[in-house]
Amino acid sequence: MNDDKTEKVEKKKPVIADMVFDDLEPVEVSVSIGGNPYILREASGGAACQYRNALIECTKLGPGGIPTALKGIASVEPLLVSLCLFDNKDKRVPVAAIEKWPARIQKALFERAKIISELGEDEEEETVGNGSSDTTDGSS
């Protein structure tokens, strides 16, 4: 028996590492499309919110919060590219211009923008070359 003695259990505080962000410069990737220079830049916090909100707006949730339908989901790809792609005058490239480019270019830019912006929350991130499945050394 414990007789009126109660044991005090000390709760240990979790060890939490400090977070230091000395470099605030966004990740940038040089891009050439049709001979024109562009910069694909890591999404800002605001751009990331806009992209995520667009994803959520496309998702219809059913009972238990399980997604049951996606409507207009393809439109979020050119949106993210537009939020991250800048011309040589540092102006964002409009969605309408991106939608005119071939799908393979849009897809490659979208995938790279997700990687450099760390927006692929539910996907395994992998190294992406030029967006194609070809390897640079000719191996398969």
Image (cartoon, helix red, strand yellow):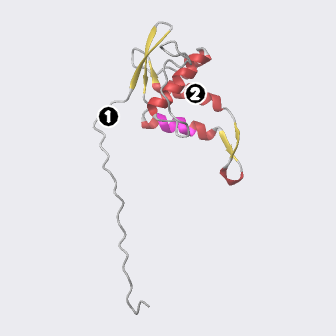
- Asked where in the image residue 99 lies, by quadrant, the reply is top right
Mark 1 or mark 2: which comes first in sequence? 1
Q: Are marks 1 and 2 in contact (CB under 8 Å)?
A: no
The span picked out in magenta is 47-53
Residue 11: where, in percent of width, then height?
37, 69
Q: Is residue 118 above or below residue 15?
A: above
- State which quadrant residue 140 falls in: top right
Q: Which x, y percent locates residue 83?
A: 49, 27
Residue at horizontal 51 percent and vertical 12 percent from the top: 138
Mark 2 Cα within 10 Å, few/some/many (few <14, many 20+)?
many
Residue indicated by mark 2: 77
Q: For the residue marked with disc 2, what is the amino acid?
A: Glu
Q: Secondary structure at mark 1?
A: loop
Give the amino acid type for the residue marked by disc 1 in the picture: Leu
Q: Which residue is mark 1?
A: 24
Q: Is residue 105 left or right of residue 63?
A: left
Q: Is residue 38 left or right of residue 95?
A: left
